[in-house]
């Protein structure tokens, strides 16, 4: 008979042997550890390094490529690498901390806006006089000739437009004092069109100078930055308005506008000289008194030579008709 304590130890021994047999015959627990390996020394499981993902794996983890009107975006990686390509700029974003690299140049817009404003009143049919004109060339013909020679010299990145006033006559005081027309809208690729329209101008009506200046300022109101009017005229206002007061009001209310003036054949017309000079001074411009074609050429070339671009971008205001906001009812 086996002592009871021996039976107990025998049962324990049998249990240990059975467990060893089961462990030896069962699949290895280590084999079931996918992605791990045994170090062969202490039975600890050491994680393997994560496999390197290929480019397709990265793309699957990121947002899809976005293509739009303004930009094209390609996102790659956990924190995203973004390539944006658009009309105004090209931007490359890469790295965990969003390192930003910008390449390309922003689309350049016109830096300066100029309206050439021409007096088409009937008095422009008079002779300019002077040694070069032999006393026979009309003021209008001289002005047209000079303009054709100088328009092409305006810098190509300056936006230019052509407006006239007094271009028609209806024998009606109200209608005749509201005669002004924008012959060529502001633009940078319109020099040939401007020259063609200048050739077609004919002197005809009154001198609604204030009305013409107001409309020219409205042409420029949608631009923020450097604005300029080049006025060519042979006389003073004939519609009972004060152009100098209009310009003073605009500039005093923050409308940035420079008016350079070429007076054509004024000679002893003191009223016209004083009025035109006042307009120029109120806008920090210059008045040139030209009595010959040569003086006109010199004056306009000086004005055009100052049309240099400064600043970077020319933007548009939300409400282009700034004149209706700044000018009182009696000036509209």
Image (spheres, rainbow, N blue to C red):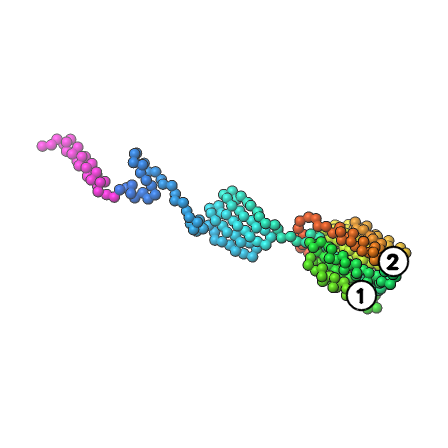
Mark closer to the chain start, 2 or 1: 2
Asked if the magenta segment contains residue 65, the reply would be: no
User: Which residue is located at x 84 percent, y 61 percent?
Assistant: 139
| Image quadrant containing the C terminus | bottom right
| Image quadrant containing the N terminus | top left
Q: Nearer the viewer, residue 108 or 313?
A: 108
Magenta residues, start to end:
1-27
Residue at the outermost left position: 1
From the image, tell me which residue sits under label 2.
131
Is residue 67 in view from this perspective? yes
Q: Is residue 245 above or below residue 125?
A: above
From the image, tell me which residue sits under label 1.
202
Q: Nearer the viewer, residue 206 or 110?
A: 110
Q: Residue 259: where, in percent of width, then height?
A: 78, 53
User: Which residue is located at x 75 percent, y 57 percent?
Assistant: 151
Q: Residue 52: where, in percent of width, then height?
A: 40, 45
User: Which residue is located at x 64 percent, y 52 percent?
Assistant: 108
The local crowd at label 2, few if under 14, some if 14 to 19, many if 20 or more residues have their Cα within 10 Å, is few
């Amino acid at each position: 008979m086996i002592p009871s304590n021996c039976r107990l130890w025998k049962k324990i021994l049998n249990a240990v042997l059975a467990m060893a047999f089961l462990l030896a015959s069962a699949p290895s627990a280590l084999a079931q550890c996918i992605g791990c390996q045994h170090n062969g020394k202490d039975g600890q499981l050491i994680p393997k390094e994560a496999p390197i993902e290929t480019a397709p794996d990265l793309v699957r983890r990121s947002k899809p490529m976005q293509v739009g009107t303004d930009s094209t975006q390609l996102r790659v990686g956990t924190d995203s690498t973004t390539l944006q390509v658009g009309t105004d700029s090209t931007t490359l974003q890469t790295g965990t901390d969003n390192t930003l690299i910008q390449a390309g140049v922003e689309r350049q817009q016109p830096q300066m806006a100029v309206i050439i404003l021409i007096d088409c009143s009937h008095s422009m049919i008079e002779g300019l006089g002077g040694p070069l004109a032999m006393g026979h060339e009309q003021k209008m013909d001289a002005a047209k000739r000079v303009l054709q020679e100088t328009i092409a010299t305006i810098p190509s990145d300056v936006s230019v437009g052509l407006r006239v006033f007094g271009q028609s006559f209806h024998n009606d005081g109200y209608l005749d004092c509201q005669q002004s027309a924008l012959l060529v809208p502001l633009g940078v690729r319109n020099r040939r069109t401007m020259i063609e329209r200048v050739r077609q101008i004919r002197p005809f009506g009154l001198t609604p100078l204030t009305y013409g200046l107001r409309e020219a300022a409205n042409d420029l109101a949608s631009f923020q930055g450097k604005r300029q009017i080049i006025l060519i005229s042979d006389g003073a206002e004939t519609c009972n308005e004060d152009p100098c007061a209009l310009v003073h009001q605009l500039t005093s209310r923050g409308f940035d506008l420079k008016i350079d003036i070429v007076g054509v054949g004024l000679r002893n017309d003191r009223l016209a000289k004083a009025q035109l000079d006042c307009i120029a001074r109120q806008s920090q411009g210059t008045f040139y008194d030209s009595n010959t074609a040569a003086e006109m050429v010199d004056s306009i070339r000086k004005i055009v030579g100052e049309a240099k671009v400064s600043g970077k971008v020319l933007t548009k205001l939300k409400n282009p008709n700034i004149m209706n906001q700044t000018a009182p009812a009696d000036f509209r």
